[in-house]
Amino acid sequence: MADPEFCATLVVRDAVTKLDALAIVALAVDRPVSGAGTVHPFIELESGARVEIEIPKFGEPPPLALDVYSRLGFEHAAMSALALLARLEEATAWTVKPDFTL
């Protein structure tokens, strides 16, 4: 049985496609997109966590969800998400908010 994964979600209130969002996040954190062209592409973060992007269902408006996953616990996922949030605030004009509390 695989180790459980913990998730901390960041919500992006701007309209952006999943492909564009993957490229923007990858550039912001200077890391490659893994699994490009698959159903579940992701970006491995420096902390060891990874980010996956969930887009709204067809016809729904934003938000876009950046799910940060960690096998080291929720606190690790949350701290990795907050570090990603800070980096995105520096590198983009996105409006990003955490969807969790510590």
Image: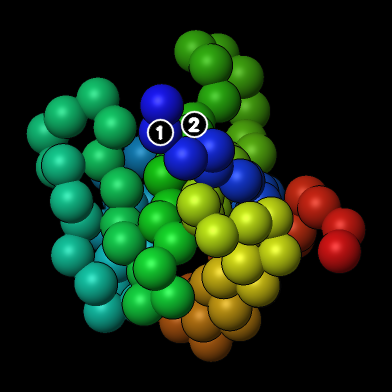
Q: Nearer the viewer, mark 2 or mark 1?
A: 1
Up the image or down, 75 lies above or below 58; here it is below
Q: Position of residue 95 (x, y in %)?
A: 67, 63
Up the image or down, 97 lies above or below 13; here it is below
Residue 44 lies left or right of residue 12; in this view the side is left
Seen from the viewer's position, the closer of residues 101 and 60 is 101
Q: Identify which residue is drawn at 49% across, 13% down.
A: 58
Residue 33 lies left or right of residue 78; in this view the side is left
Could you give the CA–CA distance between mark 2 and mark 1, rounded to whole angstroms? 26 Å
Q: Which mark is residue 25?
A: none
Query: Amino acid type of disc 2?
Result: Ile
Q: Position of residue 17 (x, y in %)?
A: 38, 40
Quadrant of res 102: bottom right
Mark 2 or mark 1: which comes first in sequence? Answer: 1
| 10 Å crowding of disc 2: few (<14), some (14-19), many (20+) | some
Quadrant of res 40: top left
Q: Identify which residue is drawn at 58% across, 78% down.
A: 83
Query: Amino acid type of disc 1?
Result: Ala
Quadrant of res 32: bottom left
Seen from the viewer's position, the closer of residues 51 and 90 is 51
Q: Identify which residue is drawn at 14% across, 42% down.
A: 36
The residue tagged 1 is 2
Task: Looking at this view, name the residue that lies furthest to the bottom.
Answer: 90
The residue tagged 2 is 55
Q: Position of residue 64 (x, y in %)?
A: 57, 41
Q: Is residue 16 visible?
A: no
Q: Position of residue 23 (x, y in %)?
A: 27, 58
Q: Is residue 19 visible?
A: yes
Task: Looking at this view, name the residue that lies furthest to the left.
Answer: 37
